[in-house]
Amino acid sequence: MESFSAGDETVGMQKTDTTITKHDSIVIEANLLYFFIFFLRKTSYIYIMGKYSMIEQ
């Protein structure tokens, strides 16, 4: 799922509030939420692995 990209974000920024439809805003929010969850999972995984490696040493 590679719908989140810098290009989409800049296009969203250039639009005014009146031109953004409800559907567009929902799609943008969903992409941001997906990216945020992916980022959290990645960082928490690295953090947990780091903790385990510290305990083993």
Image: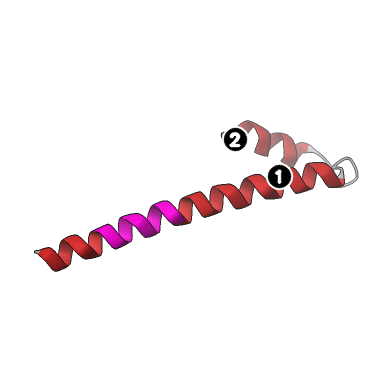
Q: Image check: 8 left or right of 17?
A: left
Q: Position of residue 31 (x, y in %)?
A: 64, 44
- Where 42 sits versus 15, above or below? below
Q: Nearer the viewer, residue 9 or 21?
A: 21
Residue 6: give its label.
Answer: 2
Q: Which disc number belongs to residue 28?
A: 1
Please determine whether, in this image, residue 24 is positioned above or below residue 48: above
Residue at figure coordinates x 82%, y 43% from the top left: 23
Residue 50, horizontal then vertical, whole percent: 24, 59
For label 2, count other residues whose C-alpha is less than 10 Å away and answer few (under 14), some (14-19) or many (20+).
few
- The chief SS type of the magenta part is helix
Q: Which residues are magenta?
A: 41-49
Q: Position of residue 9 (x, y in %)?
A: 66, 39
- Left or right of 39, for residue 4: right
**Secondary structure beneath label 1:** helix
Q: Amino acid at mark 1?
A: Ile
Residue sitting nearer the eye, 57 or 18: 57
Count every numbered label the image shows and give the total.
2
Dividing the picture into quarters, in which one does residue 48 lie?
bottom left
